[in-house]
Image (tube, rainbow, N blue to C red):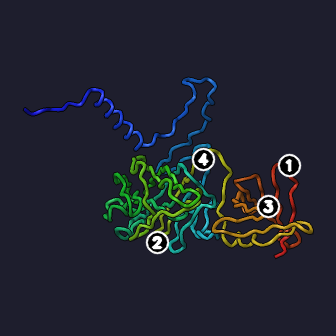
Amino acid sequence: MKRYILPSLTGVVALGIAVAATTAQAQPALPPIHLPLGHDRTRPLPPVVDPGQPSTQEQAGKAPSDAVVLFDGSDIAQWVAMNGSPTKWVVKGGAMECVPGSGYVRTLQSFGACQFHLEFATPTPPEGSSQGRGNSGLFFGMGRYEIQVLDSFENKTYADGSCGSIYNQYPPLVNASRPPGQWQTYDILWTPPQFDDEGNLLSRPRVTAFHNGVLIHYNAELVGGTDWLRRVPLQPQPGKLPIALQDHGNPVRYRNIWVRELGPKSKPEFYLSDQLLDSYCGRYQFGRNDSCTVTRRDGNLLLRFSGVEFVLFAESPTHFFAKTVDVQAEFGENDGRPTLVVTVGEDDNGRRGRKVE
Ligand code: MG
């Protein structure tokens, strides 16, 4: 006679608990989210923002009242060549226009996670075909990550290079292009990559994007840089960097460009030219026995002062600040000699130094 051994009910329950425990161990719990009490009347009301006005084909719109306006139809001062020198792009009829051969332009200011809006119009009558027709591009991360600008109206090209594509990675979900010459909009939610102090990747860059109001990317995760023919792995970079527009040899026009930074309010940061930063480098003498040194590392200055090194961020072309402590540095000139005033804390009168090396 065949004997069947049935596990006891207690055994089955114990086994179930053990499996559940193993499963729970395999998936670490997400950090808890602490919300205020429901309907908490002391919860701050959201700030009031004028939403601006939508654009029409004839008339550029107006930015929301809390946006940083990067181009309002007349002033191109927020844009420079990639090396920080003045741009050769021109302002014509309320638009800034790419001058073929003049190079990319980038914002003077650096931005992290943000909501970004721009309008573009590709040339009419259209010239060229495929990637040669109305090609430009919107770049986050100082030229690393491109959202393609192209005349994709009845113009066939490879999918991950068409208008609205995250170049060489993701075609847009749909082709929402208007005909050449007409104004089109991009509304982008950009989240930069995050790295820890050792340069390990914590999260990839992410893009949600609307083209002419139509969703074309939903939380797309970028796998690397968006170069032609190759995918350069993600590399550590500062959390805030300039936004750029591409010169790809076509006179594409832009208007009504604005950005709303996300996250806690912080000081504006500017990405200055290496040439200007280098002009601040050297040793500054405070009085007889005290001095500090200023050096450059990539796009930042390093201030070595009182045995401690601080990374400085530019709040203006002459004023810098550290993020770890309240150290401020103001560069200037006195009798033709470079000067530096370093202050620590709000009530500090500052140490005034002159450049000696
Ligand atoms: Mg392009």
Percent x, y of residue 24: 40, 39
**Compared to 85, does 4 lie above or below?**
above
Is label 3 within 8 A of ligand 1 (CB to nearest ligand atom)? Answer: no
Marks 2 and 4: in contact by CB < 8 Å? Answer: no
When asked about the image quadrant of residue 264, the answer is top right
Q: Residue at x 31, y 34 (%)?
A: 15
- Of mark 3 and mark 4, the one earlier in the sequence is 4
- As drawn, the label of residue 249 is 2
Judged from this view, the residue extending furthest toward the right is 288
Type of amino acid under label 2: Gly
Front label number (3 vs 2): 3
Marks 1 and 4: in contact by CB < 8 Å? Answer: no
Front label number (1 vs 2): 1
Percent x, y of residue 42: 64, 25
Quickly name the residue at label 3: 330
Quickly name the residue at label 1: 347
Type of amino acid under label 3: Glu
- Of mark 1 and mark 3, the one earlier in the sequence is 3
SS class, disc 2: loop
SS class, disc 3: strand
- Of mark 4 and mark 2, the one earlier in the sequence is 4
Quickly name the residue at label 4: 67
Percent x, y of residue 73: 58, 56
Type of amino acid under label 1: Asp
Percent x, y of residue 325: 74, 52
Type of amino acid under label 4: Ala
Mark 3 is surrounded, within 10 Å at the Cα level, by few (under 14), some (14 to 19) or many (20 or more) other residues, namely some
Front label number (4 vs 2): 4
Label 1 and label 3: CA atoms lie apart by: 16 Å
Mark 4 is surrounded, within 10 Å at the Cα level, by few (under 14), some (14 to 19) or many (20 or more) other residues, namely some
Is label 2 within 8 A of ligand 1 (CB to nearest ligand atom)? Answer: no
Which residue is nearer to you in this view: 177 or 282? 282
